[in-house]
Image (cartoon, rainbow, N blue to C red):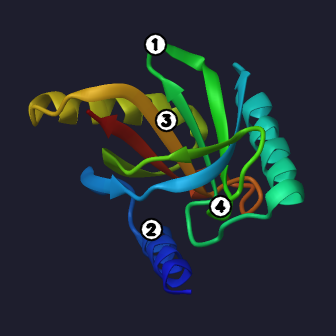
Amino acid sequence: MRDELNLTIEKLKERTREKGGDIQEITIEPQHVYCRTYNATSIADKTNLLRDTALEAMKKYETDTRKRLYFTEYSANAPMDINYCVAIPDGCEGEYVKIIPELKAISFFHHGAYEEIPEIRKRLITYAEENNLNLTGLFRNIYLEGPPQHKDKSKFITQIIAIIE
């Protein structure tokens, strides 16, 4: 219950924050995810694939609301090959289930359209270079608020993460 409250508080803080927060160094807790990999180019296709993956995960395993529920992961070397991930309860086993270990990362909360995310990714890379951080090339987008909550893209909130070696 405490984890759920912490996530809700963090989400509320981000909802009320003005655009242009700070890049932060963070630790991502380990978690079980239901994860499917697809190749997609359009934002509409990516949105539909994440929704479909979430529905599959809910039907097979339920979801773990104590964690960030929905995210995508992709490599800078192959940005169209995207892992669509949904947090599921610890202990789940089966096809498309994987355990993501604890990770160190840098993070920025983006308020706005998904089309602006590549620019945020560039800011994270620049920050890493300026602070002598070695990135793995793996990026994660965690979706806090998006199309299910808002029609206005300027109200979307996405946590953009770059994983550190």
Q: Quadrant of residue 157?
A: bottom right
Which one is in front in this view, the residue at disc 4 or the one at disc 3? Answer: 4
Q: Amino acid at mark 4?
A: Gly
Which residue lies under the disc numbered 2?
14
Residue 21, position in %: x, y? 31, 57
Q: Amino acid at mark 3?
A: Ile
Which one is in front in this view, the residue at disc 4 or the one at disc 2? Answer: 4
Which one is in front in this view, the residue at disc 1 or the one at disc 2? Answer: 1
Q: Sort mark 4 into few (<14), some (14-19) or many (20+) by Cα contacts within 10 Å.
A: few
Q: Amino acid at mark 1?
A: Asn
Q: Quadrant of residue 43?
A: top right
Which residue lies under the disc numbered 1?
77
- Disc 3 versus disc 2: distance between alpha carbons? 17 Å
User: The residue tagged with tag 1: helix, strand or loop?
Assistant: loop
Query: Compared to 74, does 96 lie above or below?
Result: below
User: The residue tagged with tag 3: helix, strand or loop?
Assistant: helix
Residue 23, position in %: x, y? 26, 50
Which residue lies under the disc numbered 4?
91
Q: Sort mark 1 into few (<14), some (14-19) or many (20+) by Cα contacts within 10 Å.
A: few
The quarter in which the C terminus is drawn is top left
Answer whether residue 157 is visible to the viewer in this image. no
Extreme-top residue of the structure: 77
In the picture, the disc for residue 99 is none
Which residue lies under the disc numbered 3?
117
- The numbered mark, 1 or 2, whose residue comes first in the sequence reads 2
In this picture, residue 139 sits left or right of residue 103: right
- The numbered mark, 4 or 2, whose residue comes first in the sequence reads 2
Extreme-right residue of the structure: 59
